[in-house]
Amino acid sequence: MIFINPTQHDNIDIRDHIAYPGLNYMVDPDLVNDFMKTRRTGGVESIGFLFGKSKHRPDVELVLVNKLINKKLKSWVGISDKVYKKNYKMAEHLFGMHIFPILLHPQSNGTVRLQSKNPKCEPEIRTNYLKHPLDVQRLADAIIFIDENLTRTTEFEKIRPVLYPAPICDNLPYKSREYWEKALTKLVVSFGDYMGGNKMGARSDTSSVVDCGFRIRGLKNVRIVDASVIPVTMSGHVEATVVMLAEKAAKIIKRTYKRSSCYNDKSRERRNQLNYKQLSCYK
Ligand SMILES: Cc1cc2nc3c(=O)[nH]c(=O)nc-3n(C[C@H](O)[C@H](O)[C@H](O)COP(=O)(O)OP(=O)(O)OC[C@H]3O[C@@H](n4cnc5c(N)ncnc54)[C@H](O)[C@@H]3O)c2cc1C
């Protein structure tokens, strides 16, 4: 949900986790054991993290799926029919694995704007993916690491991964940094982790939308409880955090109403006592 208060914000910042879906590796099926071939754990077999300058906060998450991008994965990551037909369809019958590098802390901000005063008119959403050059550089670094280092380790070499030709970038040397940077401008997908649209923050933070009790500032009893209140990008997927936020909000709401019903109980008790006194007058 995005709450747009036109008097305070004409531009809401949103952030998202994006990934490059072009690292399809063909693998020799005879070299992979049956466990890997038949295993189904929702697709994701293992994850890893790449750290840049900071030792405390990873820049990129790696997600390994035990399949090449197929029809099912296509809709999961939001690849259009046209792009699928051009880049993936001819590999449908092949066996392999896919590694997604996911940018965890993008510098590029998306924006949400009101287009009109008409509440039925949808807001304008601009994702601005990879607008900041650092985002392109970090994802390109991750792709190069996967292709030149990770898939060349002894363990990976055992299954002989071969990159299925990534989207063609004319006139650029295959697998050069420029090639990958260009490929990124052609192919990038969202992991659906939209954060920050209704940022939670201190009263002094004028860009915050909700207070620490999830209440929309300036309104009395309207709360927002979803991924949009997460104020900074996270080094991982969002769902568990959303569940935790919902649990916390439920506790806050229950406590608020318990307190008010407590007052009601007291006043009811007093009223009953008065009634009793009134009744006793009649005795
Ligand atoms: C394909 C995909 C795969 C993902 N996989 C993972 C994963 O493996 N792990 C992970 O941690 N995260 C994953 N995510 C991200 C995660 O699901 C979301 O970040 C999380 O669900 C966000 O929670 P939310 O409550 O903010 O929004 P949502 O879960 O989208 O909830 C919004 C709800 O509002 C309802 N709604 C919308 N409009 C209205 C309206 N006008 N009136 C009433 N109701 C309305 C919708 O029906 C929906 O139920 C994935 C996302 C996608 C898209």
Image (cartoon, rainbow, N blue to C red):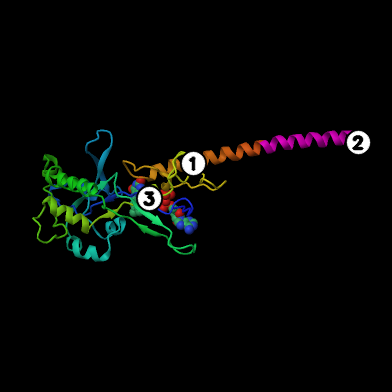
- The foreground one among 138 and 107 is 107
Q: Amino acid at mark 1?
A: Asp
User: Is 90 positioned to the left or the right of 119 in the image?
Assistant: left
SS of the residue under disc 1: loop
Compared to 131, does 240 lie above or below? above
Q: Residue furthest front?
A: 7
Indicate the position of residue 18 as horizontal and vertical percent values: 28, 51
The quadrant holding residue 81 is bottom left
How many other residues sit within 10 Å of disc 3, few (<14), some (14-19) or many (≥20)?
many
Q: Residue at x 34, y 53 (%)?
A: 110
Q: Residue at x 52, y 41 (%)?
A: 250
- The foreground one among 206 and 278 is 206
**Which badge, 3 or 2, is on the more N-terminal residue?**
3
Q: Main secondary structure of the magenta part?
A: helix
C-alpha separation, residue under disc 3 versus residue under disc 2: 68 Å
Give the residue at mark 3: 13
Q: Which span is picked out in magenta?
A: 263-283
Indicate the position of residue 259 as horizontal and vertical percent values: 62, 36
Compared to 143, does 165 lie above or below? below
Indicate yes or no whether the magenta region holds residue 266.
Answer: yes
C-alpha separation, residue under disc 3 versus residue under disc 1: 17 Å
SS of the residue under disc 3: strand
SS of the residue under disc 2: helix
User: Is 240 positioned to the left or the right of 106 in the image?
Assistant: right
Q: Amino acid at mark 2?
A: Tyr
State yes or no: discs 3 and 2 in contact (Cβ < 8 Å): no
The quadrant holding residue 116 is bottom left
- The foreground one among 14 and 20 is 14
C-alpha separation, residue under disc 1 versus residue under disc 2: 53 Å
Give the residue at mark 1: 211
Asked if disc 3 is less than 8 Å from ligand 1, the answer is: no
**Which badge, 1 or 2, is on the more N-terminal residue?**
1
